[in-house]
């Protein structure tokens, strides 16, 4: 009886803790109501386990304390290169180009909410094939004379990952400054290879892995070589990004030559100074005089758990709301909140040709069925949706009216909008937006359209998968 009494007491204490956690979610953390209700459901369905899931993946107190420190560090980093940034940001933006004039409000928004400098002398290369992207990345690293800065969420311990590390070691031995920043969960390269990089004179740092911040990952994919050439997009480093998997692969990235590289360099320094013991400061070697390669106007925009605003999501919304003719979206994960769903629905009902392309096969089944469910919701409003049948589509792009676009690391889901650290290039240029639109239209040749009829007639087992998965989608 005594043992039973003790067991009951422990159980009661545990349940009390769960109720207090639920109370805290509702009243203290000011969560999105859908997210709060989902966590409360977890507590009720999984007593005991729900508490541990919340501590690792849901609680917000640690995030606020930890990332407020990162935001302060970011501000100091901005001040370190402040004069150059202020000069660029304060320049009067020419409005003789109708495209620029149309998106001037968006440009100003990013300057205000993200300190995202705007540059207009860029030449881009658009990549939709990993072989082309990594060929050019390797060539750029081979030609590096002063520094190579790489930041990737995933680096696989496979032939491509090892080839990158071997090349970085060689460049470090040649005297080039090499810095490699990776996510602690995404890094798969052996400690031996990282030690080789250190011995060669290179540096590496991991975006943190702490017990109560495991849910906040650095999802950015950035490369900067000599401050004159930069890459941004959806490609991580691994053989699957070359299409060498049973799923196949379709992704997107751009190479920037021009002053837009400054935005990539600033973003890298902010993250590097936070994650490493080295505090890199402004130097003309890292920000050489722009060469004026082209005439594309763009901004590099970043968002993350360290910001009170969701800058990339706000950019997506601004683009959606600006559409008058067409709106093409590619994303592997589509789990929008109400604001995004409403914006897309309103655009379609207003006569805009809204099209969303998602994978035909899941790499994460839970996320796939949630994605399928949310896409299905929009069909009645006239949105057209497609599953890409020629390889897993990992591209994160939006093209509006063929004149403005975004390419980067941010998916259309609550994780990218609220939890992950993301970086996207927003570009205002008919030539390159047109290239991305043309790539989308080529992909349609390998797609199956999800019609209202086919979605309405989906099997019962699919409906069950959708509903169960969707129930927990607000957890982020």
Image (cartoon, rainbow, N blue to C red):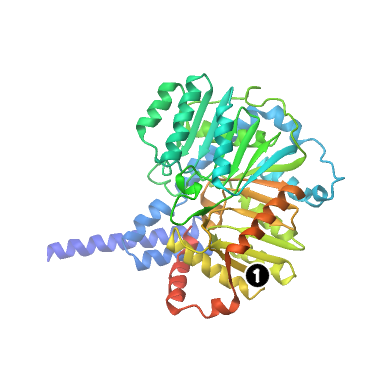
- Residue 132, how many percent across, how many down? 58, 43
Decide: is 277 above or below 42. Answer: above
**473 relative position to 315: left or right:** left
Residue 452 in view of the camera: yes
**Residue pictured at 84% horizontal, 50% vertical:** 98
**Residue pictured at 72% horizontal, 57% vertical:** 400
Q: Which residue is mark 1?
A: 383
Query: The N terminus appears in which quarter of the rendering?
Result: bottom left
Specify the quadrant of the image occupied by residue 126: top right
The residue at the far left in this view is 1
Q: How many marks?
A: 1
- Residue 210, how many percent across, how many down? 39, 42
Between 330 and 44, the one lying in front of the other is: 330
Between 125 and 319, the one lying in front of the other is: 125
Density class for disc 1 (Cα within 10 Å; few <14, some 14-19, many ≥20) is many
- Residue 248, how many percent across, how many down? 49, 55
**336 relative position to 327: left or right:** left
**53 relative position to 423: left or right:** left
The residue at the far right in this view is 96
Q: Secondary structure at mark 1?
A: loop
Between 44 and 453, the one lying in front of the other is: 453
Residue 73 in view of the camera: no
- Residue 371, how many percent across, how many down? 52, 65
**Residue pictured at 38% horizontal, 63% vertical:** 19
Decide: is 370 above or below 102. Answer: below
């Amino acid at each position: 009886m005594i043992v039973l009494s003790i067991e009951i007491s422990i159980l009661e204490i545990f349940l009390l803790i769960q109720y207090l956690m639920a109370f805290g979610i509702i009243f203290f953390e000011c969560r999105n109501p859908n997210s709060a209700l989902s966590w409360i459901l977890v507590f009720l369905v999984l007593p005991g386990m729900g508490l541990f899931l919340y501590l690792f993946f849901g609680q917000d107190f640690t995030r606020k304390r930890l990332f407020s420190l990162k935001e302060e560090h970011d501000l100091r980093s901005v001040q370190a290169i402040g004069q150059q940034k202020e000069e660029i940001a304060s320049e009067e933006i020419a409005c003789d180009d109708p495209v620029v004039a149309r998106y001037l409000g968006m440009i100003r928004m990013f300057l205000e909410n993200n300190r995202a400098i705007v540059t207009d002398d860029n030449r881009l290369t658009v990549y939709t094939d990993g072989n082309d992207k990594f060929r050019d990345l390797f060539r750029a690293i081979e030609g590096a004379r002063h520094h190579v800065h790489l930041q990737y969420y995933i680096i696989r311990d496979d032939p491509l990952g090892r080839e990158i590390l071997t090349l970085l070691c060689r460049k470090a031995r040649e005297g080039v400054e090499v810095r490699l920043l990776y996510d602690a969960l995404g890094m798969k390269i052996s400690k031996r290879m990282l030690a080789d990089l250190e011995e060669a004179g290179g540096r590496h740092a991991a975006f943190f892995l702490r017990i109560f911040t495991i849910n906040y990952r650095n999802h950015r994919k950035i490369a900067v070589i000599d401050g004159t050439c930069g890459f941004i997009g959806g490609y991580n480093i691994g053989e699957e990004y070359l299409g060498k998997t049973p799923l196949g692969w379709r992704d997107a990235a751009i190479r920037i030559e021009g002053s837009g590289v400054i935005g990539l360099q600033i973003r890298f320094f902010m993250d590097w100074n936070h994650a490493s013991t080295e505090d890199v400061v402004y130097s003309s070697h890292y920000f050489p005089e722009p060469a004026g390669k082209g005439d594309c106007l763009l901004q590099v925009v970043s968002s993350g758990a360290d910001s009170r605003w969701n800058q990339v999501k706000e950019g997506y919304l601004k683009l959606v709301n600006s559409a008058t003719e067409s709106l093409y979206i590619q994303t592997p994960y589509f789990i929008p909140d109400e604001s995004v769903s409403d914006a897309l629905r309103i655009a379609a009902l207003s006569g805009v040709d809204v099209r969303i392309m998602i994978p035909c096969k899941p790499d994460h089944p839970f996320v796939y069925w949630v994605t399928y469910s949310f896409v299905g919701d929009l069909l009645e409003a006239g949105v057209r949706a497609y599953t890409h049948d020629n390889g897993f589509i990992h591209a994160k792009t939006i093209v509006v009216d063929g004149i403005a676009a975004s390419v980067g690391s941010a998916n259309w889901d609550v994780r990218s909008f609220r939890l992950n650290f993301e970086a996207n290039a927003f570009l205002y240029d008919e030539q390159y937006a047109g290239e991305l639109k043309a790539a989308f239209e080529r992909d349609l040749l390998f797609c199956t359209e999800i019609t209202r009829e086919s979605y309405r007639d989906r099997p019962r087992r699919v409906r069950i998968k959708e509903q169960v998965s969707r129930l927990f989608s607000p957890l982020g």
